[in-house]
Amino acid sequence: MSDPIDQEDVQVHSLLSRVIRLLAERKDNVVIMTTTNGSATTFTVSAHSDDLKWIIGRQGVMVWSLRTILHAIGMTTKRQYTLFVDDETIGPHEK
């Protein structure tokens, strides 16, 4: 069961959403689901399969960088943030 989302989580979600939408070509297909359990929040990103290469980056560098930013924010807010990229996303045949 998910806890209610607090204001800090909303701000982090907004930041993450803006950054990921800037990376994606199909911005309307980007969806970020938020699950909160106590002081831990998980963001699950879904996007068009063609955009995953931009979100994940070469050898995972981009997603690793996003996770590093979330970790730094979590250190200052005393919360734990986790980022998953859903690779079971919208394929090229779907619009």
Image (cartoon, helix red, strand yellow):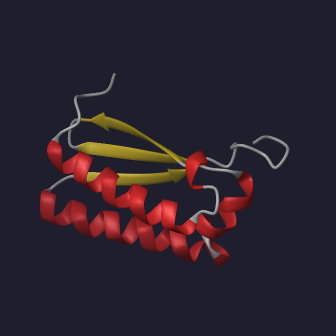
Q: Quadrant of residue 23?
A: bottom right
Determine whether 91 is above or below 71 in the image. Answer: above
Tell me residue 48's x, y (percent): 68, 51
* Label tally: 0
Tell me residue 67's x, y (percent): 41, 65
Q: Quadrant of the N terminus?
A: top left
Q: Is residue 87 left or right of residue 85?
A: right
Q: Compare residues 41 and 92 and report the one nearer the observer.
A: 92
What residue is shown at x 78% (from left), y 46% (from top)? Answer: 91
Determine whether 67 is above or below 62 in the image. Answer: above
Tell me residue 56's x, y (percent): 60, 66
Q: Compare residues 26 and 87 and report the one nearer the observer.
A: 26
What residue is shown at x 57% (from left), y 55% (from top)? Answer: 27
Q: Is residue 4 left or right of residue 58?
A: left
Q: Is residue 8 left or right of residue 82?
A: left
Tell me residue 95's x, y (percent): 75, 42
Of all residues, the one furthest to the top in this rendering is: 1
What residue is shown at x 30% (from left), y 65% (from top)? Answer: 71
Q: Is residue 91 left or right of residue 43?
A: right
Q: Quadrant of residue 65?
A: bottom left
